Image (tube, rainbow, N blue to C red):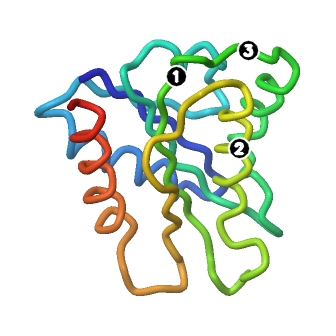
Amino acid sequence: MNIAIFFGTETGNAEMLAEDIATELEDQHETTVANLADSAPEALQVADLNVIVCSSYDDGDLPASAKPFVERVQSEMPDLTGVRFAIFGLGDSEYAETYGFGSMKLAELLVSRGAQALGERPVHDAAGDELPEDMAMPWLLEIIEAADA
């Protein structure tokens, strides 16, 4: 399967997780990794599955590298019908009222343009003990298996 992995990050954690995911998948799938800041909305129309790793920043805002992509989607209003994506959030539950809002806002925007979200949108808690890749990989493998069926 052709899987494009995009990341939106403020401090680099989402980028590291995106790279880890690509490394885990590269033996069985064709993978690419790209920063959302460098990606046009049309980039989502290339792969069989788009995996997005997106952190939250400040009071549930989108991270800096996701903002240019979101602005392009909002201004260009692309038709993303047929685009399939899975999104994994990074957040900190110490900011309970806005926990994981960055990935939520991005997912809602993509769905509003016709894209199909696959699976749940988990959010890794930076305040917890679990490593993000230990949470992300079982989630993603389940989505890939369902998408391949």
Examine the rendered structure and indicate whether residue 42 appears above or below residue 100.
above
Could you tell me how far apart the alpha carbons at marks 1 and 3 are, in whole angstroms? Answer: 11 Å
Q: In terms of depth relative to the viewer, which is nearer, 124 or 57?
A: 124
Q: Could you tell me the amino acid type at mark 1?
A: Val
User: Who is closer to the viewer here, 100 or 118?
Assistant: 118
Residue 108 horizontal/vertical position (percent)? 71, 44
Query: In the image, is residue 143 above or below residue 26?
Result: below
29 or 22: nearer the viewer: 29
Mark 1–mark 3 CB contact (< 8 Å): no
Residue type pointed to by label 2: Glu
| SS category of the residue bearing label 3 | loop
Taking the spot 50% from the left edge, 35% from the top edge, the residue there is 6
Rendered image quadrant of residue 102:
bottom right
- Mark 1 residue element: loop
Residue 104 locus on image (x, y percent): 67, 54
Q: Which residue is mark 1?
A: 83
Query: Which residue is identified by label 3?
Result: 78
Q: Are marks 1 and 2 in contact (CB under 8 Å)?
A: no
Residue 72 picture location, percent across and down: 79, 23
Quadrant (top left, top right, bottom left, bottom right) of the N terminus: top left
What residue is shown with label 2?
108
Q: Are marks 2 and 3 in contact (CB under 8 Å)?
A: no
Name the residue rendered at 83%, 69% in the picture.
59
Q: Label 2, secondary structure: give it.
A: helix
Decide: is 63 above or below 2.
Answer: below
- Image quadrant in which the C terminus is located: top left
Of 96 and 32, the residue lying toward us: 96
Q: How busy is the neighbourhood of tag 3: few (under 14 within 10 Å), some, or many (20 plus)?
A: some
Q: CA distance from mark 1 to mark 2?
A: 14 Å
- The tag earlier along the polypeptide, 1 or 3, is 3
Which amino acid type is shown beneath numbered disc 3? Pro
Q: Residue at x 32, y 49 (%)?
A: 140
